[in-house]
Image (tube, rainbow, N blue to C red):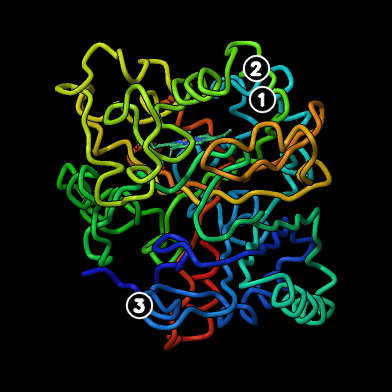
Amino acid sequence: MLELDDIQHFLLTRPPAKAAHYAFGTFRDASQGRRWLAGLIEKVGCGTSASLSGPPDSRWVTIAFTYNGLRALGVDDASLATFPEEFRQGMAARAAILGDTGTNHPDHWLGGLASPELHAIIILFARDVDERKRCVTEYQQYAAAFPGVEALSTLEIEATPPFDYAHDHFGYRDRLSQPAIEGTGDMPTPGSGAPLKPGEFFLGYTDEDGVIVPLPRPEILSRNGSFLAYRRLEEHVGRFRQFLKQNGDTHEEQELVAAKLMGRWRSGAPLVLAPKKDDPQLGADPQRNNDFNYARMDPHGYAVPLGSHMRRMNPRDTDSNISRRRMKARRTTERTAASRPSSDARVSSGSSSSRRTCGRTTSPSTSLVTNTIPSSALRTARSNSRSRTGRFGNASSGCRRSPPSKAARISSFQA
Ligand code: HEM
């Protein structure tokens, strides 16, 4: 039985947020940091508070800590040593293993993300921009009492219209293929496979191998927590469109190139089921748009190239042990000056998806990928593509509505 009242909502559901505020914090003073956390604890949503089935809340708060953050809050060395090595090292130190070289080198990471001073990530999702403003103002008033807790940087995020379906900066329909987790009430869409054991995502539960991974100690630091990878990506949408134009003479050809790169048409229709022509109705139908396999339906990659994004990220039934290699993604997009409509944007607006956010060829848009990483990924120290997605933090438990004791409440936030 999942302890939903102790698992952060972020790991369980996607709130219908149109605005977000990310704060990257550092603790200059351990005792102030702990008091700051104690006061925030009631703000963090959990599985039972985040209205998974009822009317939606208006704002959702998530907190995750780095290894350095736990240390800065006063977690002792014996406890810190029980965390997985990859988490202890941190992502910047592992850049060479993860392929973060050249322009992706930590030297170029923005907002202090490569700094050992990065201790915590606080993520606010808000119903809309006004609600975000209200929450940020309220938070700033609260945080003023804790000068020993500083923000290294912040990031404001806004969804780009239209808001009736999820799509990324390049115009692809998103959120189609996500694993369901046993015990959360998630219903997998056809083709998505059976719900996965909760131990693939939450610490303290049985995983797909029937094992409960040993928890970092003390348990209150880790039980019901998860490992979070945070990654900020620069997306050159204009260059992407140029590439399509260079490789396709007609609009139809360009859309086919875009589909072959992804494995789906921008409408979301999978190439396995619609190999020649887009089928927007199929793309929008959750009962059909993920209902395919590769081994029987496209073994050689004639429809979905073996190197397409989707097939590399999830080779489905053409690889083994896939159920141990899934993740939950929470992608958000940044609306920058570069994301305003422009003539370039209009040129490529012919596809069924309308997120044409970046008009200038040289101006990047930004997307945030925040993924939960299966504990098995850390345990086996694979340096596969999933590990590339971010900086590890620990999305702690920390939302118990009936707090045990003050000390325990603070501790549960620390993980
Ligand atoms: C420029 C950045 C990226 C863009 C624009 C992008 C876009 C997409 C799109 C449109 C889909 C298809 C929708 C879906 O199946 O839900 C998808 C699927 C997926 N992406 Fe990405 N993605 C990006 C980066 C990443 C990264 C960094 C990872 C993780 C390492 C990742 C992992 C996945 C996975 C696991 C799937 C599901 C594949 C499946 O189950 O068939 N993506 N991506």
What's under tag 3, amino acid-wise? Ser
- The x, y position of residue 409, in whole percent, is 51, 79
Left or right of 297 in this view: 57: right
**Which residue is labeled 2 in the image?**
245
Q: What element carries label 1?
A: helix
What's under tag 2, amino acid-wise? Lys
Query: CB under 8 Å between callouts 2 and 1?
Result: yes
**Which residue is labeled 1 in the image?**
241
Q: How crowded is mark 1: few (under 14 residues within 10 Å), some or many (20 or more)?
A: many
Q: Looking at the rendered structure, which numbered label has been put on residue 337?
A: none
What's under tag 1, amino acid-wise? Arg
Q: Which residue is drawn at 22% across and 34% down?
A: 292
Q: Residue at x 71, y 37 (%)?
A: 346
Question: How far, Cα to Cα, is label 3 from label 1?
Answer: 39 Å
**Which residue is labeled 3 in the image?**
53
Which badge, 3 or 1, comes first in the chain's sequence? 3
Which badge, 3 or 2, comes first in the chain's sequence? 3
Left or right of 331 in this view: 310: left
- The x, y position of residue 28, in whole percent, is 79, 61
Question: How far, Cα to Cα, is label 3 from label 2?
Answer: 44 Å
